[in-house]
Amino acid sequence: MTKQLTTDSRPLLLWNDMTAGLVVFLVALPLCLGIALASGATLFSGIIAVVVGGLVVSLASGSSVSVSGPTAVLAVMVGASIQALGSYRVFLLAVVLAGFMQLILGLLRLGVLGDYVPNSVIKGMLAGVGLVIMLKQIPHALGRDQDYEGDFEFFEGQDNTITDILEAILSASPGAILFTVISLVILLRWDWLADRTIPFLRRIPPSLVVVLIALGVNQGLGLTWPAMQVTAREHLVSLPVVTSAADFFAQFTLPDFRAIGNPKVWMSAFSLAVVGGVESLLSLEAADRLDPYRRISSPNRELAAQGLGNLVSGMIGGLPVTSGVVWTSANVYAGARTWRASFIHGVLLVGAVVMIPVFLNMTPLACLAALLIVISYELTKPSIYAAMYALGWSQFLPFIVTVIAILTTDLLIGVMVGLLVGLFFVVRQNHHEAVTVVHQDHHYLIRLNKDATFVNKNELRDKLRRIPSGAQVFIDGMKALYVDRDILEVVEDYER
């Protein structure tokens, strides 16, 4: 369903997109730097990927709320590929080729494969991602920033996410706790404050207020209470500082096309294209479900748009891009209405890198962790689990298995596990009473109640086996629009 926009509503929609773009910018800033760090690439490569996702993919994609950039799912694969290929420039060639492959897959209309993921698994993916984000941000909110932003791994050597939270509680930083509490109060009570004081405050994004207050308070603590000030570089945003135009353009890197004949390059490109394409299609399904207007996006166009984004990102030194659930959910819950929100966040990031990197590097990570916790809660709040449980085990079990698998493994593995569980219920449902038998004396009527496929083969054989010898058997397939070869062979075998 689409919503027609009147002329009077467009200024408000543009304001919503501007504020949403600002929120996504604030969320994307530490995440893209952390993912670049985890990938073994330069920090600037993560920024390039986010900018390309905002300025290129948002224009080419048909989605109104989806946001693209580097994601944690590809971080490990990127790091392994860089090591296997020997240099970052050769890896960039693989990114370009992956983009070309995705572009071709989109033109061949293979994006429709994403439509076969059950809704229970999509809902489980959203809830699982929300739960992972919330748990992984708790240590940052308490001042324990040993793991990079964007790290969503549950098991970390001898430790795991739960032990990391316990250690963060035992070693909590008073300054980080202060900023987290202030940020949560502002984020959760901003609308309440606006309703009781100045209604215009509703037009000001609370995320911007959080960052500005955190910056001001942290600098003020340096003058009044130095022990509470957050000063360590690992507890602050770490945006690369560009001092000149030459320094800015030196950050861009061209791919090494001399390695075009290397089989490893093509294998890496194929892996990036498939994994990135699957993640983008899943994220697009999630984006359409989160979209307040319930608009339906074209998966083929999205796949082609991701391919174009990877072509551009690889050509100028950026990490591979995909549509990401984290970025998209932040965009939707910040009030985004059109693709302009994603475009604006790309523009803001370019401006931040060029004009105010030193200013942004004073931002405590704790306030951004609070912002992510609030966003992730909307994805995984208890009412969602209760609603899925009320739908019955056929919906709840694939949902909760997907959540647990994403929490303990990663996004793609979690979705695959959820798909297997969902497939079990699909087969079970299709197997249930697909064939009925009625009889009178020695006349038996076998009726196919719906389309008959190989999953119904055993049931049909079993019921044919129970018919006594010498009976006259009629098979009625009028209700089945499709009967596959496996069923016909069962009938032919029985007839012989």
Image (tube, rainbow, N blue to C red):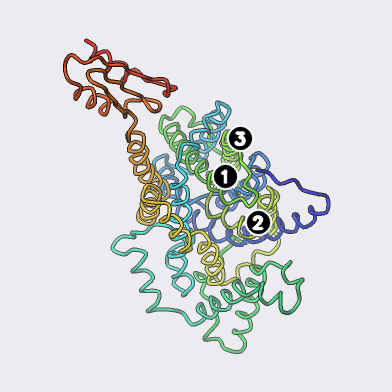
Mark 2 or mark 1, whichever is nearer to me? 2
Residue receiving disc 3: 301
Q: Quadrant of the N terminus?
A: top right
Residue 61 shown left or right of residue 125 in the figure? right
SS class, disc 3? helix
Q: Is residue 389 visible?
A: yes
Q: Earlier in the sequence, mark 2 or mark 3?
A: 3
Mark 1 and mark 3: Cα distance apart in space:
24 Å
Residue at 52% in and 46% down: 283
Number of other residues with Cα within 10 Å of mark 3, as a class: few under 14, some 14 to 19, many 20 or more: many
Q: Earlier in the sequence, mark 2 or mark 1?
A: 1
Can you give x and y, in whole percent of width and height, for residue 170 in the image?
37, 79
Q: Amino acid at mark 2?
A: Leu
Can you give x and y, in whole percent of width and height, for residue 308 in the image?
60, 36
Residue 352 shown left or right of residue 398 in the figure? right
Q: Amino acid at mark 1?
A: Gly
Q: Which mark is residue 119?
A: none
Residue receiving disc 2: 349
Residue receiving disc 1: 317
Q: Amino acid at mark 3?
A: Arg
Mark 2 or mark 3, whichever is nearer to me? 3
Q: Nearer the viewer, residue 492 or 151?
A: 492
Seen in the picture, residue 312 relative to 182 is either above or below; the reply is above
Q: How many marks?
A: 3
